[in-house]
Image: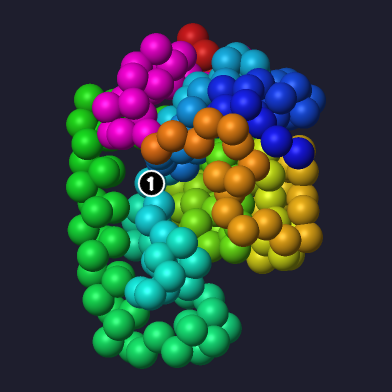
């Protein structure tokens, strides 16, 4: 299944997720590309939009291959099988972690500067990315949402690799997708337009988002 761009993928994913509207979810996009998909989902569900900042830990000689991920609040996910298969040493892993932790903290400070996180305690956290290959970053995002007190966690993306569904099963109550190929080389291969987003693009998507709010019974 191919998508014109992230906006189209988000609209289609929003249609698939329409049944969650009554649960009053908080939609959380994974920066950067996932936020463009999440913005469409949040609009479709009339839900608040926020980010959950995570960083992939790429294999040093093959950065697109995730051997783990880091998330806000000290979340750390390592795929030991990939680390061993790629022959990554502990010093190499530590170096990648230091670099990505610094970038995670920079992005979190940028995205949160004028917008505090939407409270997740007792809420349904709907985590959205533009695609899930190994599941490492999505898994870290689920753990971030859990640590923030989310009552239920749903991971969603237009395309999710078959193997990643099993990876997410222990941390997500549900995994929702439009397509799940057995194998695909890169998430970008599922899009006609997969241009990289900048921090400014993420902030622009967040700016018009609905202000943080609770479900109807919590409003005054």
Q: Is residue 23 visible?
A: no
Q: Give coordinates of residue 116: x percent, y percent.
A: 30, 30
**Segment colored magenta:** 197-217
Question: Which residue is pictured at 62% across the width and 26% down the height?
Answer: 4
Disc 1 is placed on an element classified as: loop
On screen, residue 59 above or below 7: below
Residue at the spot x=78%, y=60% of the render? 182
Q: Is residue 9 left or right of residue 67?
A: right
Q: Residue at x 28, y 34 (%)?
A: 199
Residue 56 position by quadrant:
bottom left
Closest to the observer, 152 or 129: 129
Residue beneath disc 1: 53
Above-or-below relation of 172 to 134: above
Give coordinates of residue 195: x percent, y percent.
44, 34
Vertical side of 125 occupied by 78: above or below: below
176 vs 63, left or right, is right
Q: Residue at x 38, y 75 (%)?
A: 61
Task: Judge whether residue 203 is colored magenta.
Answer: yes
Residue 83 can be seen in this image = yes
Task: Measuring from the top left, give residue 204's x and y in whole percent.
Answer: 33, 20
Residue 6 inside the magenta-drawn segment? no
């Amino acid at each position: 299944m191919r998508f014109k761009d992230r906006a189209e993928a988000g609209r289609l994913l929003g249609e698939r997720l329409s049944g969650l509207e009554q649960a009053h979810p908080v939609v959380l996009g994974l920066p950067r590309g996932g936020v463009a998909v999440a913005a469409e989902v949040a609009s479709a569900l009339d839900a608040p939009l926020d980010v959950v900042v995570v960083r992939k830990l790429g294999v040093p000689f093959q950065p697109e291959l995730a051997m783990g991920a880091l998330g806000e609040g000290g979340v750390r996910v390592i795929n030991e099988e990939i680390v061993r298969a790629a022959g990554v040493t502990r010093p190499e892993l530590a170096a990648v972690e230091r670099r990505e932790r610094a970038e995670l903290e920079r992005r979190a400070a940028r995205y949160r500067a004028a917008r505090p996180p939407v409270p997740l305690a007792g809420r349904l956290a709907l985590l959205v990315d533009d695609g899930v290959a190994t599941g490492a970053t999505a898994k870290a995002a689920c753990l971030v949402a859990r640590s923030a007190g989310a009552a239920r966690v749903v991971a969603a993306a237009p395309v999710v690799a078959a193997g990643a569904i099993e990876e997410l099963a222990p941390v997500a109550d549900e995994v929702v997708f439009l397509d799940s190929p057995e194998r695909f080389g890169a998430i970008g291969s599922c899009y006609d337009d997969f241009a990289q987003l900048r921090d400014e693009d993420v902030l622009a998507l967040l700016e018009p988002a609905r202000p943080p709010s609770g479900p109807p019974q919590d409003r005054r």
